[in-house]
Amino acid sequence: MGIGTVSRVINSSPAVRPQTRARVQAVMEELGYVPNPHARRIAGGRSYTVSVLLPFVGTEFYLRLIEGIEEELGEQRYDLALFPLLSKKRLERFLNSSALAYHTDGLIVASYDLAERFPGGRLPTDRPVVMVDARSHEYDSAFLDNELGGRMAAEHLLGLGGPIFAVQIEEELDQAFANTVFSSRIGGFKAALQEAGAPLAAERLYKTRLSAEGGQIALQRFLEVASPPINVFAAADVVALGVVEEAERRGLRVGAEVRVLGFDGQPWTEERGISTLQQPVEEMGREAARMLIERLQGADYPPRQRRFEPCLLVRASTRV
């Protein structure tokens, strides 16, 4: 077997027959061979590192997203370099083509389409780029249909009867990022209510930050407008948790007097009995990494869009 064939197997090239790949991998395992990543970088002229740009690091959503990305990249022996935006000041650094993030082998950009800030809608790099948790027409993208999720939330709460309220998440980074996942969720929710002949009045929509405290304050405002039973759609699970905590503090029965539906499908919602719209966070991360790896291996075709759908999980908080 030729050196070139063995090299292609080690570097996960798709141009190898499955039988040949299996034979090479069997011999590698028998010999205890482990590729040297430093030698690989030198010989291949690559960094074998992928930049991941994301708004934050500490939230559960992004930790799960990173886990999915890292799992897929690790299988191909790529390292991951995180570049959190965190603030408008840090964001400005990535508007310069000399930013370190643009000099790895490729980029995965989460949630905010920074390319919209540049002429032609493309980032200042010739490296492959994939968007995750955001839809793009210029680059490959893996995203959740958040508008569909909002519509599903409206349909579920309409079936419960009683007044409907919603908690929208404020956008914190910059006005340039108006089209975010949270806006799409509430947009779908309001559209579905409008089509059902039950439009959402302004006093029944409360905007707050992404926190449990925001959910607590939202329920306080809603109870000034209507008496129980009421239905609340929180555009994120952590906000739904705040609504539940405030209801419990007031001695209101969750699921009867205050019905709460969250969004994200965080693992802890099951224990708290919170109904939610679950999104496949880890799988979105893995899919984004797979698409980037294909580009790094030479795939050349028009930008692809991988659309994921949320799944409604009905639990005690809306099980009337």
Image (spheres, rainbow, N blue to C red):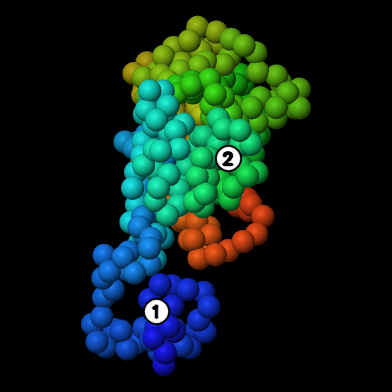
Q: Which amino acid type is shown beneath numbered disc 2?
A: Arg
Question: For numbered disc 1, what is the local secondary structure?
Answer: helix
Q: Establish if 279 lies above or below 163.
A: below
Q: Residue at x 70, y 30 (%)?
A: 192
Mark-to-mark CA distance, 1 and 2: 33 Å
Q: Mark number for residue 122?
A: 2
Q: Residue at x 50, y 16 (%)?
A: 207
Please rate how many residues cluster around mark 2, counting C-alpha atoms within 10 Å: few if below 14, some from 14 to 19, many from 20. Answer: some
Task: Give the left or right position of residue 114, taking residue 121 as reference.
Answer: left
Q: Establish if 80 lies above or below 34.
A: above
Q: Establish if 156 lies above or below 291.
A: above
- Who comes first in sequence, dot 1 or dot 2? 1
Which sits in the foreground, 267 or 296? 296
Q: Mark number for residue 114?
A: none
When asked about the image quadrant of residue 25, the answer is: bottom left
Task: Give the left or right position of residue 216, taking residue 167 as reference.
Answer: left
When asked about the image quadrant of residue 181, the answer is: top right
Number of callouts: 2
Q: Position of residue 183 (x, y in %)?
A: 58, 27
Q: Is residue 251 visible?
A: no
The quarter of the rendered structure image containing the N terminus is bottom left
Q: Position of residue 243 (x, y in %)?
A: 42, 23
Question: For numbered disc 2, what is the local secondary structure?
Answer: loop
Q: Position of residue 105 (x, y in %)?
A: 42, 54
Q: Which amino acid type is shown beneath numbered disc 1?
A: Ser
Q: Residue at x 43, y 44 (%)?
A: 102
Which sits in the foreground, 270 or 108? 108
Q: Hey, which residue is sitting farthest bottom in the picture? A: 1
The quarter of the rendered structure image containing the C terminus is top right
Q: Which residue is mark 1?
A: 7
Q: Residue at x 42, y 90 (%)?
A: 2
